[in-house]
Amino acid sequence: MAVSSTSGTSGTSGTSTSTVTGSTNGIANNFDQFLLLLTTQLKNQSPLDPLDTNQFTQQLVQFAGVEQQLKTNETLGSLLSLSAAGTATNAVGFIGATVTADGTATRLIDGKADWKVNMPSTGTATITIKDSNGSVVQTLTKTLAAGDQTFTWDGSTSLGTKAPDGEYSITIDAKNVAGESITAKTQISGVVDGVDFTSSIPMLKIGSISIPIDKVKSVVRGD
């Protein structure tokens, strides 16, 4: 069981936090400069022509606005950090659970690989299975019913041999009874054994397969 790059948070969260911090520092520098200019202006005003009260009031209002913006940005940065930490904690909680997610790649284990397939209508499907290198190992033609179903591959290749266990992906070219192209959706399932935080969003690991956490459709945890 492995958790990659747990120091931190996701790339998006880190970038967002850095952006807020950088913006806050920039505003703070401008804020200090504004205060220095205002103080200098007050010190050097002519007794015969003092600073106009209305103008001074407007500057104070601007001063207060900048201060409020600084506090707002600091609060936003804190909220982003808390949110990122929560996302990381939630992602780690998936380890050991069986998840179902949108995807085309799954693992052949002991000569068996399953995909969940959803067909918008009954039709004929040309199913192409590729290995992790992108090479076609099997092509099958099947009639698939409308709705959800499971397609199971026994590892048989087009050469009559058995494919070794590992990662394989599926492509389905389906047509309805009228010969029109239709889109078959595929999902995969597996037990999460790690989390990778190096991408823009946490990636759940099922062996060598990476699943974006936002693609997860269901989670089942055994007793």
Image (tube, rainbow, N blue to C red):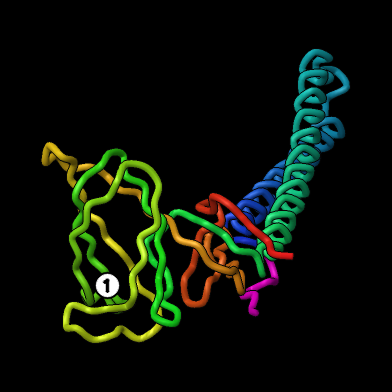
Q: Mark 1 points at which residue?
A: 130
Is 200 displayed left or right of 41 in the figure?
left
Extent of the magenta region:
1-8
Give the percent coordinates (x, y) of residue 172: 25, 56
Q: Which residue lies furthest to the top in this view?
A: 54
Residue visible at 15% across and 40% down in the picture: 177
Residue visible at 88% across and 22% down in the picture: 47
Residue visible at 65% across and 79% down in the picture: 1
Give the percent coordinates (x, y) of residue 123: 21, 45
SS for callout 1: strand
Q: How crowded is mark 1: few (under 14 residues within 10 Å), some or many (20 or more)?
A: some
Please name the amino acid that badge 1 sits on.
Lys
Magenta stretch mostly in which secondary structure? loop
* The one of 217 and 39 positioned closer to us in this rendering: 217
* The one of 34 and 107 positioned closer to us in this rendering: 107
Residue 33 appearing in the image: no
